[in-house]
Image (spheres, rainbow, N blue to C red):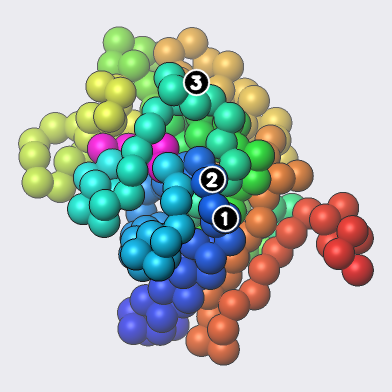
Amino acid sequence: MTEQLQDVGKRLAGRYAADLVEEGMVVGLGTGSTVLFAMERLAERMNEGLSLCGVPTSYQAELRARTFGIPLTSLAECCELDLAIDGADQVDPSLRLIKGRGAAQTRERCIAEAARRLVIVVDERKVVGSFSAPVPVEVISFAVPLVASRLAGMGGSPVVREGVSKDGPVITDNGNWVIDCTFPSIDDPDALETAINTLPGVLSCGLFCEFAEKTTVVIGEKEGIRTLMPRYSRGLCE
């Protein structure tokens, strides 16, 4: 899939998700390139008269939303969201996710928990039969050696994420470090998520398994849009 086709898919998915937003909704705004297209479309709809309020998942999402003129609030003001629009690194057939390439998975998990419905926007490369991407893990700096040791004991290969335009480790919006851990295979994502998230010093890993029942995946393809929904949702629609 060429980069140009990827951008077409991302744009289609992002704009489709934005059109799911209804008048007066409070919307979680995810981090990443595909959600950027959703914000672009939300700004267009606001110019047409739509009212909404956004809750950003990162400083990047906040800055982008302000650029588009999207009114913002926070979980302190509103901890029940109508909808959250976010991206993913990979999506499996059970609508479980790997997230965190943008190092925002902890705040993204909070927004996903607060939202009644989670809409994940991806291009077709992100839909996989089984997970193969590294699992990002946000860790307090004090615990990085301990967590890395425990991840290795689980069969993973942990690597501290380094900055691109700075020396040293990536620092999250929460002031923590990120370990990217590659596993030879992830046969039980639910169990692995629990095992990682319960390690002392870990805030959140990038495995998102607990939100599948309220997740809709919007896939942008060169032919158009394809959606994946939980089985019970498909049954209600048929």
User: What residue is disc 3 on?
Assistant: 150
Residue at the image position 28 percent from the left and 16 percent from the top:
141
Residue 156 versus residue 41 in the image, above or below: above
Q: Is residue 55 magenta?
A: yes
Image coordinates for residue 146, horizontal then vertical, percent: 40, 14
Q: Could you give the CA–CA distance between mark 3 and mark 1, rounded to whole angstroms?
A: 45 Å
Asked if one can make out residue 18 in the rendered structure from this viewpoint, the answer is yes
Image coordinates for residue 84, horizontal then vertical, percent: 53, 46
Residue 209 versus residue 201 in the image, above or below: below
Camera-side mark, 2 or 3: 2
Q: Could you give the CA–CA distance between mark 2 and mark 3, rounded to whole angstroms?
A: 42 Å
Q: SS at mark 3? A: helix
Residue type for callout 1: Glu
Residue type for callout 3: Arg
Circles 2, 1 touching at the beta carbon (< 8 Å): yes
Image coordinates for residue 226, horizontal then vertical, percent: 64, 75
Residue at the image position 32 percent from the left and 49 percent from the top:
70
Would residue 238 be found to the left or right of residue 173 on screen?
Answer: right
Image quadrant for the C terminus? bottom right
Q: Quadrant of residue 56?
A: top left
User: What residue is disc 2 on?
Assistant: 25
Earlier-in-chain disc, 3 versus 1: 1
User: What residue is disc 1 on?
Assistant: 22
Classed neighbour count for the residue bearing mark 3: other residues with Cα under 10 Å, few (<14), some (14–19), many (≥20)? some
Would residue 68 be found to the left or right of residue 23 on screen?
Answer: left
In this rendered view, identify the residue nearer to me: 176 or 58: 58
Residue type for callout 2: Met
Q: Which residues are magenta?
A: 54-59
Earlier-in-chain disc, 2 versus 3: 2
Classed neighbour count for the residue bearing mark 2: other residues with Cα under 10 Å, few (<14), some (14–19), many (≥20)? some
